[in-house]
Image: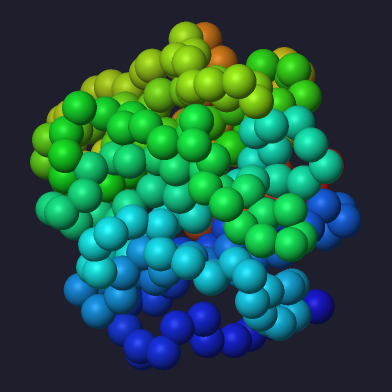
């Protein structure tokens, strides 16, 4: 099935998308955010897989009206559906502020214990992803620094487990041989060296396109992921496809 629709009214700057099972029926919905331009602010919307609007998921995640927003998802509180994770777009007006949002079918609410700055800068936003990297049935939060010159490809991990944010032993520069700037992009991927989800880190703008697998304790998987292949394929709930097959389990 192929679906196509326009999430926002502007013909510029594209959109950020994430597959998130916010309803809890085992089928991923689509959470969107505008691309990193000066036309649209951090307006998050949600759609069914065929493009039907979910009207109660339509909100501004931050108070700026520029640079869009990144969306992600993960079952961070261990209930029957995934929550929406947001991070600001790569502008100089908002720092790496990660927020969580819960949709229970009746309405959407901010999660008061998931609101934190992942890095010490106040610019260039961030990227976030959710995945159960420690196999405890709760999704952890992985972050990457935004696309500015202050921070390099720094991957960090945070734990929520329906209690509060704590730092995980995930703090690694995914591409240590490169200059520490321009951030990284991350996604979760159920594949690799042992059990549980793994983080796939992709280089941000400014250096070559390449991906590496990063495990929970900062150790890299032996296998490197072909960046061009990863860029061509789409996302599902586990983050990407493996050898042309969707892995949504």
- The answer to which of 145 and 68 lies nearer the viewer is 68
Image point 45% across, 15% down: which residue? Answer: 167
Horizontally, residue 116 falls left or right of residue 161, namely: left
Q: Is residue 90 visible?
A: yes
Q: Which quadrant of the figure has residue 172?
A: top left
Q: Position of residue 157 (x, y in %)?
A: 47, 23
Q: Position of residue 130 (x, y in %)?
A: 59, 37
Horizontally, residue 180 falls left or right of residue 34, namely: left
Image height of 205 relative to 140, above or below: below
Q: Which quadrant of the figure has residue 202?
A: top left
Applied colour scheme: rainbow
Q: Is residue 232 visible?
A: no
Image point 71% across, 82% down: which residue? Answer: 52
- The answer to which of 234 and 83 lies nearer the viewer is 83
Image height of 12 relative to 183, above or below: below
Image point 70% across, 46% down: which residue? Answer: 82
- The answer to which of 91 and 195 lies nearer the viewer is 91
């Amino acid at each position: 099935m192929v679906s196509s629709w326009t999430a926002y009214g502007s013909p510029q700057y594209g959109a950020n998308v994430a597959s998130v099972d916010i309803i809890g029926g085992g089928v991923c919905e689509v959470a969107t955010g505008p691309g990193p331009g000066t036309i649209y602010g951090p307006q998050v919307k949600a759609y069914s897989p065929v493009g039907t609007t979910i009207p109660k998921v339509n909100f501004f995640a931050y108070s700026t009206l520029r640079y869009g927003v990144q969306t992600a998802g993960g079952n961070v509180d261990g209930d029957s559906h995934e929550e929406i994770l947001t991070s600001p777009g790569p502008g100089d007006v908002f720092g790496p502020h990660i927020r969580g949002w819960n949709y229970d079918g009746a309405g959407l609410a901010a999660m008061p214990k998931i609101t934190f700055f992942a890095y010490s800068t106040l610019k260039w936003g961030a990227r976030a992803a959710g995945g159960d990297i420690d196999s405890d049935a709760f999704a952890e939060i992985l972050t990457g620094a935004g696309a500015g010159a202050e921070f390099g490809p720094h991957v960090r991990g945070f734990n929520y487990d329906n209690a509060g944010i704590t730092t995980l032993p995930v703090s690694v520069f995914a591409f240590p041989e490169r200059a520490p700037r321009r951030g990284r992009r991350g996604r979760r991927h159920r594949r690799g060296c042992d059990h549980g989800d793994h983080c796939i880190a992709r280089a941000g703008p400014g250096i070559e396109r390449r991906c590496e697998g990063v495990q929970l304790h900062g150790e890299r998987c032996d296998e490197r992921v072909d960046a061009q292949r990863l860029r061509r394929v789409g996302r599902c709930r586990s983050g990407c496809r493996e050898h042309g097959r969707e892995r949504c389990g």
